[in-house]
């Protein structure tokens, strides 16, 4: 094909037999080559895929060949080979702005995920629900392709790829079966925001796309709901002064003309929009920076602080003002919410935290750290500014940290635990990584330096993570794996020794695992369940709450109860919900805690007294997926007091899912 400004003709009769034969032959050759050499000549398949992307019939032919494409290891050796770690915002950029080959591979991946979502193809590492949520978010980020004409940049893409991608999204939309696309996508945005993630760039992009499409009457069908208006206003026009999104210069001029009563109304409106959605408008930093020169006393109101947060603000005014001056800009607007929630947590009253933040304010980044931040966040502000902003975000929402596109759940869990429980420890480790490009931790009396170790799982900088994770996770990941390597050969699971050394001495020294590390078979499963109840359940442990959040491991399953893999989480607390059901509230670092694990076990993120960022389950359902936990052996109840029917219920759920055959 040649580049053209004209819309390509869509074949009426679908792809020719010759095109399909070329594709099938290319897939066969790929499968043969991979079987012998393990080297993927994928470009022949990509070339055969390209002409099929321009018609619904061609896309249907690709859909039918998803099993063959997977069997041929088309995605082998690439990020697409691990669909559970793919990031919607990155996928949306790749499919619109990537190189032609990457665009076509991403397109095939999304067709594959459609097959998974519809239940026509089963993938070993991703559930139908996960695939469905992923595609919904990608659709929302590319809503303009569905609702309107192509942009000039799309029309001018090499070999008319823009038209192919538009055809793909019409196909996805048709087969996902959304009766009211807008209503579904808005619900998806609220579902994500209920978990208050630190990273919200993708969510804001979804809201932007929804706002643009609503400017075109009838583009999406359905009425504009109050939920949509609240989201759009929170991002673009949260107050009367910026109601029509006038731009920063006009808004700054309006602020200069406002009296104190009007400024007060602006502050109240900003706070209300931020706390009701978890999103911060880029106008808010303009407002707060204006208050720095005119009315500092109004800033706590604009941040929506309670007596606790306002008291912390007034106890440390010089520090808070400096943090605002150095970190809060339109490009980093989200850190206003991070700052507010950090103050609400009261962590500044812990003696080491304020000095640690002063150190962070004065920290000089090494070249390697600065380059990483510039590569991800750009250069509109200094690397130090972007890092400081995300320090506030992470300290304010320690349960909103996500692992991005890497399977580094252990390191992300550690960052969350430190931010939640040991903020000065987090800031110390971050200072080393940012200043020295090195983290040193002790393991059984010996130092381990990340500088001296090879790459772990995060061989490249993680994607779609905050700046704190960006700098620390690659170092932490290497150290974690080195600790594990040093623990091999002891006859038990290495986590027994690694977790306490890695996460901190507050980790319980008692250790329980449900499976034999050599055979993978269940080991004293009845005792394992009883020990959990006796250690954690308030009815059986003497009513002792979880004092320090504890690392644990779960066996993740999908809605069909298929085992997907082991995963690191944190047990935050156990408590009765509004229905008087005892639940385990836990942190899951995988970017989205709302999951269906089969057998009616659906992790809840709201509606059962969850705090922002927590997932929860009734105790027996949670324990049915638990495979490893720590506990304090000196503060444990009597295991024999745990009711047998409760133990049997958890055991039966496990044996009907991940533990089947073990």
Image (cartoon, helix red, strand yellow):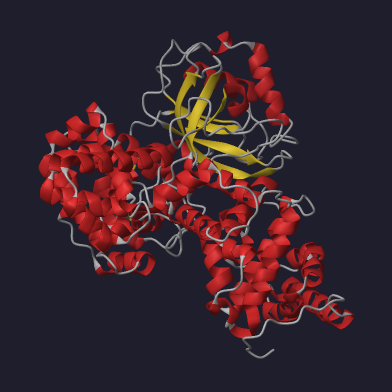
Q: How many tags in the picture?
A: 0
Q: Residue 9 vs residue 500: left or right?
A: right
Give the quarter of the figure containing the N terminus.
bottom right
Quadrant in the picture for residue 399 = top left
Q: Residue 430 vs residue 61: left or right?
A: left
Quadrant in the picture for residue 31 = bottom right
Q: Nearer the viewer, residue 615 or 182?
A: 182
The percent coordinates of residue 525 (x first, y second) are 64, 25
Q: Residue at x 52, y 46 (%)?
A: 228
Is residue 296 visible in the rendered image? The answer is yes
Q: Residue 217 vs residue 246: left or right?
A: right
Q: Residue at x 42, y 55 (%)?
A: 465
Give the quarter of the figure containing the C terminus.
top right
Is residue 349 visible in the rendered image? The answer is no
Q: Residue at x 75, y 36 (%)?
A: 661
Q: Is residue 620 above or below residue 384?
A: above
The percent coordinates of residue 210 (x first, y second) are 53, 55
Q: Is residue 640 above or below residue 64?
A: above
The percent coordinates of residue 601 (x first, y second) are 65, 31
The percent coordinates of residue 182 (x first, y second) are 61, 51
């Amino acid at each position: 094909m040649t580049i053209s400004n004209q819309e390509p003709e869509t074949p009426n009769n679908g792809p020719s037999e010759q095109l399909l034969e070329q594709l099938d032959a290319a897939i066969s050759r790929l499968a043969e080559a991979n079987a012998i050499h393990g080297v993927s000549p994928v470009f022949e398949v990509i070339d055969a895929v390209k002409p099929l992307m321009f018609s619904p019939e061609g896309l249907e032919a690709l859909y039918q060949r998803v099993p063959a494409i997977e069997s041929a290891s088309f995605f082998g050796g690439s990020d697409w080979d691990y669909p559970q770690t793919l990031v919607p915002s990155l996928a949306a950029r790749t499919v619109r702005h990537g190189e032609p080959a990457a665009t076509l591979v991403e397109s095939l991946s999304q067709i594959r995920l459609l097959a998974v979502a519809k239940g026509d193809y089963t993938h070993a590492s991703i559930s139908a629900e996960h695939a469905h949520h992923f595609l919904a978010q990608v659709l929302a980020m590319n809503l303009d392709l569905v609702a309107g004409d192509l942009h000039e940049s799309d029309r001018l893409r090499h070999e008319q790829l823009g038209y192919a991608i538009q055809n793909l999204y019409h196909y996805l939309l048709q087969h996902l079966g959304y009766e009211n696309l807008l209503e579904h996508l808005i619900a998806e945005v609220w579902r994500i925001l209920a978990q208050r993630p630190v990273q919200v760039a993708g969510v804001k992009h979804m809201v932007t796309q929804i706002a643009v499409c609503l400017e075109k009457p009838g583009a999406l069908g359905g009425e504009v709901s109050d939920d949509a208006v609240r989201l759009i206003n929170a991002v673009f026009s949260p107050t009367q002064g910026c109601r029509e999104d006038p731009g920063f210069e006009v808004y700054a001029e309006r602020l200069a003309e406002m009296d104190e009563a009007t400024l007060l109304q602006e502050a109240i409106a900003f706070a209300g929009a931020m706390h009701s959605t978890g999103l911060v408008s880029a106008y808010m930093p303009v407002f707060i920076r204006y208050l720095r020169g005119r009315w500092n006393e109004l800033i706590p109101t604009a941040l929506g602080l309670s007596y606790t947060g306002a008291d912390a603000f007034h106890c440390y005014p010089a520090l808070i003002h400096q943090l605002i001056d150095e970190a809060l800009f339109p490009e980093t607007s989200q850190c206003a919410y991070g700052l507010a929630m950090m103050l609400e947590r009261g962590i500044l009253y812990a003696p080491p935290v304020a000095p640690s933040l002063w150190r962070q304010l004065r920290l000089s980044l090494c070249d390697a750290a600065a380059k990483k931040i510039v590569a991800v966040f750009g250069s509109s502000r200094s690397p130090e500014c972007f890092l400081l902003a995300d320090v506030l975000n992470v300290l304010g929402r320690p349960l909103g940290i996500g692992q991005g596109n890497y399977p580094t759940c252990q390191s992300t869990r550690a960052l969350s635990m430190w931010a939640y429980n040991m903020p000065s420890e987090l800031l110390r480790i971050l200072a080393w990584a940012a200043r020295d490009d090195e983290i040193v931790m002790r393991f059984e009396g010996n130092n381990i330096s990340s500088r001296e170790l090879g790459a772990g799982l995060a061989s490249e900088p993680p994607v779609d993570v905050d700046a704190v994770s960006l700098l620390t996770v690659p170092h932490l990941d290497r150290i974690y794996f080195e600790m594990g390597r040093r623990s091999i050969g002891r006859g038990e699971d290495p986590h027994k020794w690694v977790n306490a050394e890695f996460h901190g001495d507050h980790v319980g020294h008692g250790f329980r695992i449900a499976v034999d590390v050599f055979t993978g078979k269940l080991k004293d499963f009845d005792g394992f369940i009883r020990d959990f109840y006796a250690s954690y359940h308030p009815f059986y442990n003497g009513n002792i709450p979880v004092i320090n959040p504890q690392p644990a491991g779960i066996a993740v399953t999908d809605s069909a109860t298929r085992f997907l893999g082991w995963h690191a989480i944190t047990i935050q607390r156990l408590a009765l919900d509004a229905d008087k059901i005892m639940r385990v509230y836990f942190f899951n670092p995988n970017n989205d805690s709302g999951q269906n694990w089969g057998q009616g076990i659906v992790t809840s993120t709201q509606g059962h007294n969850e705090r922002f960022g927590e997932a929860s389950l009734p105790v027996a359902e949670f324990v049915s997926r638990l495979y490893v936990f720590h506990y304090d052996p000196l503060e444990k109840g009597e295991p024999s007091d745990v009711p047998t029917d409760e133990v049997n219920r958890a055991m039966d759920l496990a044996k009907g899912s991940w533990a089947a055959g073990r």
